[in-house]
């Protein structure tokens, strides 16, 4: 008899829990709705820097000096980025949810030699006196020049244009999710523009 009473009590408890869960599920609050007031300079500045693309570079460098001559297969990469704290919203139509943003041109954010994939092809002694050679000094200078080469190659016109297209797609998709259509215009780069000196020795 006690067992039957206990079983009935447990069933009553479970029934009460099921009723509470059903009421909770039926009375869930409405979903959260997020809206955008449109692009502003402050919101762009929060991103600070937008990495638009990564460029991979490969080349063979020949170094000669310090009593030796060497050939090196260089591999490296660099990041192309846009500095968003220099961006400006030049036009905004809140009724149509459209805006135009002016961005500075992409620059080389970071260039590096990939030492795990860079190989020494050969190094030969050119000095008559054996102790007049310094292969370490030759390699150090070649690696320094290699890093500058990677930055210069990454900052080519073709790579800059590719980074622009990538940035336009990223920013456009970012605001499309909140119902805005954004057009990107680019500041004219100086005629003598060179890749940003961000190489690290």
Image (tube, helix red, strand yellow):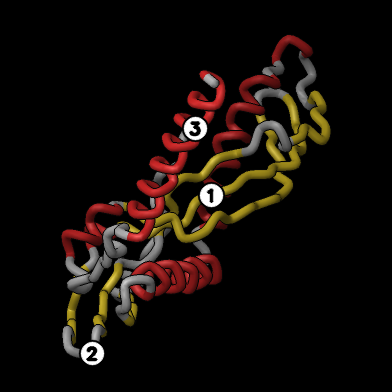
Residue receiving disc 2: 96
Q: Is residue 161 left or right of residue 24?
A: right
Frontmost residue, 165 versus 97: 97
Q: At which x and y percent is residue 160?
A: 48, 67
For label 2, the SS is loop
Q: At which x and y percent is residue 185?
A: 32, 79
- Disc 3 and disc 1: Cα gap in Å? 72 Å
Residue receiving disc 1: 78
Residue 80 in sight from this viewpoint: yes
Residue 201 in sight from this viewpoint: no
Check if mark 2's residue and mark 3's residue have beta carbons within 8 Å.
no
Q: Quadrant of the N terminus?
A: top right
Frontmost residue, 110 versus 24: 24
Q: Residue at image x 63%, y 53%?
A: 56
Q: Residue at image x 64%, y 52%?
A: 57
Q: Earlier in the sequence, mark 2 or mark 3?
A: 3
Check if mark 2's residue and mark 1's residue have beta carbons within 8 Å.
no
Residue receiving disc 3: 8
């Amino acid at each position: 008899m006690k067992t039957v009473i206990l079983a009935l009590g447990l069933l009553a408890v479970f029934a009460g829990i099921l009723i509470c869960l059903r009421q909770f599920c039926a009375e869930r609050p409405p979903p959260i709705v997020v809206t955008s007031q449109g692009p502003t300079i402050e919101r762009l500045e929060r991103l600070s820097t937008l990495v638009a693309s990564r460029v991979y570079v490969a080349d063979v460098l020949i170094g000669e000096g310090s009593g030796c001559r060497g050939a090196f297969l260089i591999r490296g990469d660099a990041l192309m980025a846009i500095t968003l704290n220099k961006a400006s919203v030049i036009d905004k139509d809140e009724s149509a949810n459209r805006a135009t943003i002016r961005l500075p041109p992409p620059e080389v954010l970071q260039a590096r030699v990939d030492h795990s994939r860079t190989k020494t092809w050969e190094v030969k002694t050119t000095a008559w006196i054996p102790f007049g050679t310094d292969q370490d000094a030759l390699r150090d200078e070649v690696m320094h020049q290699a890093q500058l080469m990677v930055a210069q190659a990454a900052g080519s016109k073709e790579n800059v244009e590719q980074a622009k297209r990538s940035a336009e797609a990223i920013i456009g998709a970012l605001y499309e999710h909140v119902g805005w259509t954004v057009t990107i215009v680019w500041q004219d780069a100086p005629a003598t523009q060179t890749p940003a000196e961000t190489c690290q020795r």
